[in-house]
Image: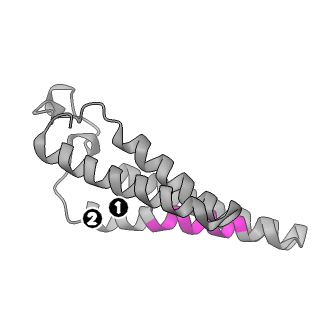
Amino acid sequence: MKVEAKMLLGLGLFFGIMCAVYWNWSLENAGGVMMFAGMLLCFLPGSYYYFWSRRMKARPEDDPNATQASGAGVVGSFPGTSIWPFTLGMGAFMVVLALVFGIWFLIPGLGLVAWALLGGTAEGRRGGKV
């Protein structure tokens, strides 16, 4: 996680410097605020990764002299295909549409969200398709 932390902290530093330069030269608020938000969005996970990288043992990815064999091991299981993420997305989309077009979109949207959460939970516990 040290590589990821260094990359994100470096990117946050870059955005911070560019934010200061942009803010002072352009005298325009919107772009400066967006660059400041980008800086914070890099510093937040970067500092979290840095915090944990100092407390974890080194991974093979963190060793510059590591070989491909040192990273070999058990590969976990991956979830199969499922319709529930799509159903959850469509439900969330309809909930957002309720804010724009009318409250009546909220009823089918919340229904789809509840159905997707129940179906995804049941599928995850059973280990197969529902």
Direction from residue 34 to residue 12 in the image, left or right? left
Residue type, mark 2 in image? Trp
Whether residue 1 appears in this view of the structure is: no
Residue range highlighted in magenta: 34-44
* Secondary structure of the residue carrying numbered label 2: helix
Where 24 sits versus 96, above or below?
Answer: below
Residue 17: quarter of image: bottom right
Direction from residue 78 to residue 51 in the image, left or right? right
Circle 2/circle 1 CB separation < 8 Å? yes
Residue for point 73% across, 71% down: 33
Where 130 sits versus 33, above or below?
Answer: above
Q: Which residue is mark 2?
A: 52
Q: State the image coordinates of residue 126 (x, y, percent, origin top left).
A: 11, 42
Residue for point 61% across, 62% down: 98
Q: Is residue 71 magenta?
A: no
Q: Which residue is mark 1?
A: 49
- Distance of label 2 from label 1 (alpha carbons): 5 Å
Disc number for residue 79: none
Residue for point 25% across, 42% down: 63
Of residues 55 and 91, the one drawn nearer to the viewer in this rendering: 91
Residue 51: quarter of image: bottom left
Where 82 sits versus 125, above or below?
Answer: above
Q: State the image coordinates of residue 34 (x, y, percent, origin top left).
A: 71, 65
Direction from residue 58 to residue 19 in the image, left or right? right
